[in-house]
């Protein structure tokens, strides 16, 4: 129910702010965080309205190579672990199962709570993602696609608005990046690991690029994953909108 | 109406079963054995062996000493039970009330049935002839009480017909065992010189009870008919099948869906009463021209949910070609499971986990379109070999029996088949300096390893793998391994996975 009707005053600014909050609510942005679902992404959260990671929404991740996709899978798994920490279920829809289930445990996910669905073609994939997003028993849906049209993404967005689950679309290849109705578009690149000047590979670290976010501020952040939580990397944290390519 | 009971005794039930499958056994002495207290004991003998002096309960070694060329078969404790059950179900043609009388008999309540065969004598002769045709040796008796029929089947003639009201006289000359007494009591009676029933049946009841226990009086009362014996009839399994005949042949899609809906409602109602749920169900449409197109669906867990089942059928209904018309619809549950009704939640939250009905219904829907095999859940397995460290779960509800290992870092994405790479490695067992994957050269900056994983020889033979976690100059992390020793003639490097 809109709060607009209750506003008697003709103050334009007030009307505008109420309208804005209504729109945000409908788009899956919340003003208050449900208990236990706070995703500790540090300063990255400032990119979103109300500093809250939108959960009833579809996020889009683009990756150009297998290395990118692995980094994206890791980052998404980190977000999933918070969202499904109370026994929620994730559906992972992909053309072939290339996730190594035991590795998900490192990101705080119980791998047995993830249902992997193998699809033969993009049409089946879209249908399956939509069905899974509509299901209230599923907390998160991860779908791996080659491309997604605006109409298809709109359908997915409409599905989550009803079920309040969270969708993650992992798109392979940068060529088919078009306009979508997804709430945000991310690009995750691997960074050299957090070694603390010790020998070896260290903890995973990523360059998280928020290319587009509806009603928010895009930017670039460096984030690592250590001991089951995201850790911000401060050395070159920058919020430079100039670096963002206009084309995507 | 007076009750009439038939007792059938299959004297050589289990040996007859073997003889029916192998004719040569019938001609030779043959026993069935089972282990008991560390030795082999004869549990059943056939007629030939019995004639040669072998008995049930004797040690197999003794039996072999008597008859060196004795045929021996292994016993299966469930065989006789299931055989008897099947015979009982088959016997429903003689009377609606057939009770099992373990270990090797049946009791019929044949009241009002025998006149269809033209009398008691003809009734028993027909049953006996049919069993003999099949190969079973059967002894039968008909009397007014189950107890008397039991006694006469075992201790009377091969076919004994006791006229109405004469059952007491008929058993008087039988030994005390005919009363279905415990072995110890029968032995005691024999020791006291009471070798026939008439010698003690008239004795005062108090003294019988004091000396032989209350069981004895119950058995006597059951034979005489003072106490009615409780018998449990076998019930044939009724298939979960619903039929819907049409007055006129139908051919429209709407009428097919209506028929399906009707059938689902009645079938699910029946299942609900029996606390069963559908796992697999087939919908058959009998066409006018004799063809029977059918549609089958299966569910991941038992369900009685009509609209869910209908949704599963819906995409497949289009494949039913009505032809000139369908005159009969049949819905049959091919597989059902117990489904105990659960208390309904007040709030249908998203937190039902894997037990959530909505989730099961979603999985069914997906399986209907993209196939059952495409949907998998993984559980941990206690293996070091990466490909074997997890396995597919059999069902949505299956719980892991072991924990996921987290002591070693594993790549989040893995190649289903490791891919060959070209590598420059400085000295044995050092991580490589350079490697080329898909034509691109990667310079290794950081590395962890080696972590040697051996083949599990009891599962598979082959070379071990030495795994390295490496990071190249752009920060990409890889999982690579060398198959075999460095100084082997044929060692190879593979890329197996990508770290996050």
Image (tube, rainbow, N blue to C red):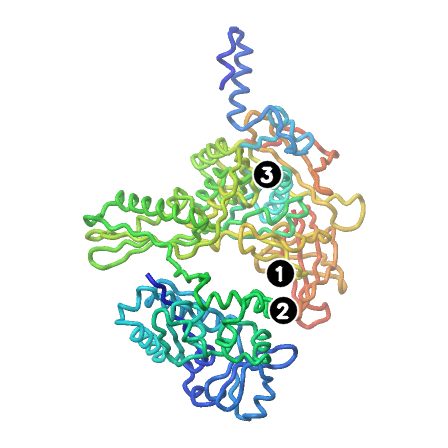
Quadrant housing residue A222: top right
Q: Residue at x 72, y 67 (%)?
A: B486
Could you say which is closer to the camera, residue B445 or residue B206? B206
Q: Secondary structure at mark 1?
A: helix
Could you say which is closer to the camera, residue B355 or residue A134? B355
Q: CA distance from mark 1 to mark 2?
A: 10 Å
Quadrant housing residue A68: top right
Question: From the viewer's perspective, is B285 left or right of B177?
Answer: left
Q: Residue at x 52, y 20 (%)?
A: A22
Do we see residue B381 in this rendering? yes
Could you say which is closer to the camera, residue B182 or residue B279? B182
Residue under circle 1?
B388
Query: Which chain is disc 3 placed on?
Result: A
Q: Secondary structure at mark 3?
A: strand
- Residue B163 location (% of width, % of height): 34, 72
The numbered mark at residue A187 is 3
Mark toward the viewer: 3 or 2: 2
The numbered mark at residue B459 is 2
- Answer above or below: position of B462 versus A203: below
Query: Which chain is disc 1 placed on?
Result: B
- Answer above or below: position of A43 versus B429: above
């Amino acid at each position: 129910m809109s709060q607009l009707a209750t506003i008697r005053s003709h103050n334009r600014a007030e009307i505008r702010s109420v309208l804005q909050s209504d729109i945000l609510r409908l788009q899956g942005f919340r003003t208050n965080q449900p208990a236990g679902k706070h995703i500790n992404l540090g300063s990255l959260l400032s990119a979103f309205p109300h500093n809250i990671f939108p959960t009833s929404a579809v996020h889009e991740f683009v990756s150009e190579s297998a290395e990118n996709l692995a980094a994206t899978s890791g980052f998404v798994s980190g977000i999933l672990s918070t969202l499904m920490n109370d026994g929620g279920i994730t559906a992972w829809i992909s053309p072939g199962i290339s996730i190594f289930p035991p590795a998900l445990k490192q990101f705080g996910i119980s791998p047995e709570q993830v249902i992997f669905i193998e699809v033969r073609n993009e049409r089946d994939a879209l249908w399956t993602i939509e069905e899974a997003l509509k299901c209230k028993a599923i907390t998160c849906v991860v779908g791996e696609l080659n491309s997604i049209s605006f109409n298809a993404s709109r359908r997915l967005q409409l599905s989550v608005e009803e079920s309040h689950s969270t969708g993650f679309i992992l798109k392979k290849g940068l060529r088919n990046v078009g306009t979508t109705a997804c709430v945000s578009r991310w690009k995750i690149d691997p960074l050299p690991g957090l070694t603390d000047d010790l020998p070896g590979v260290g903890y995973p670290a990523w360059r998280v690029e928020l290319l587009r976010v509806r009603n928010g501020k895009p930017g670039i952040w460096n984030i690592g994953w250590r001991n089951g939580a995201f850790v911000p990397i401060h050395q070159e944290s920058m919020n430079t909108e100039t670096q963002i390519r206009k084309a995507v | 109406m007076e009750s009439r009971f038939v007792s059938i005794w299959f004297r050589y039930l289990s040996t007859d079963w073997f003889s029916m499958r192998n004719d040569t056994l019938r001609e030779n002495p043959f026993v069935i054995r089972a282990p008991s207290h560390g030795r082999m004991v004869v549990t059943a003998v056939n007629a030939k062996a019995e004639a040669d002096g072998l008995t049930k309960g004797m040690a197999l070694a003794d039996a072999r000493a008597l008859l060196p060329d004795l045929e021996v078969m292994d016993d299966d404790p469930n065989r006789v039970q299931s055989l008897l059950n099947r015979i009982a179900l088959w016997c429903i043609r003689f009377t609606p009330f057939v009770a099992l009388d373990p270990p090797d008999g049946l009791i019929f309540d044949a009241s009002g049935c025998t006149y269809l065969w033209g009398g008691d004598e003809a009734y028993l002769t027909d049953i006996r002839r049919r069993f003999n045709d099949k190969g079973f040796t059967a002894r039968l008796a008909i009397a007014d009480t189950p107890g008397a029929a039991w006694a006469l089947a075992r201790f009377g003639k091969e076919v004994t017909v006791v006229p109405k009201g004469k059952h007491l006289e008929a058993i008087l000359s039988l030994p005390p065992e005919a009363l279905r007494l415990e072995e110890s009591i029968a032995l005691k009676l024999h020791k006291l010189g009471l070798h026939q029933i008439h010698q003690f049946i008239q004795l005062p009841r108090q003294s019988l009870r004091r000396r032989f226990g209350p069981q004895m009086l119950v058995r006597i009362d059951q034979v005489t008919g003072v106490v009615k014996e409780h018998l449990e009839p076998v019930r044939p399994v009724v298939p979960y099948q619903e039929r819907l005949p049409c007055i006129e042949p139908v051919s429209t899609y709407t009428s097919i869906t209506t028929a399906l809906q009707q059938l689902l409602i009645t079938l699910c109602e029946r299942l609900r009463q029996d606390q069963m749920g559908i796992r697999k169900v087939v919908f058959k449409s009998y066409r006018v021209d004799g063809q029977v197109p059918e549609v089958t669906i299966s569910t991941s867990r038992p369900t009685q949910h009509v609209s869910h089942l209908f949704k599963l059928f819906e995409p497949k209904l289009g494949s039913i070609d009505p032809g000139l018309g369908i005159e009969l619809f049949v819905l049959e549950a091919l597989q059902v499971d117990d489904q105990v009704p659960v208390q309904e939640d007040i709030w249908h939250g998203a937190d039902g986990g894997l037990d959530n009905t909505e989730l099961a219904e979603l999985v069914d829907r997906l399986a209907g379109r993209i196939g059952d095999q495409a949907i998998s859940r993984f559980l941990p397995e206690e293996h070091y070999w990466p490909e074997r460290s997890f396995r597919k779960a059999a069902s949505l509800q299956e719980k892991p029996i072991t924990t996921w290992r987290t002591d070693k870092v594993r790549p989040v994405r893995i190649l289903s088949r490791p891919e060959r790479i070209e590598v420059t490695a400085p000295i044995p067992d050092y991580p490589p300096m350079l490697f080329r994957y898909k034509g691109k050269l990667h310079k290794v900056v950081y590395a962890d390893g080696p972590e040697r994983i051996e083949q599990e020889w009891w599962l598979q033979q082959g070379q071990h793998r030495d795994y390295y976690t490496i990071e190249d100059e752009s920060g990409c992390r890889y999982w690579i391994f060398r198959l075999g020793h460095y100084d082997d003639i044929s060692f190879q490097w593979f890329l197996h996975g990508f770290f996050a």
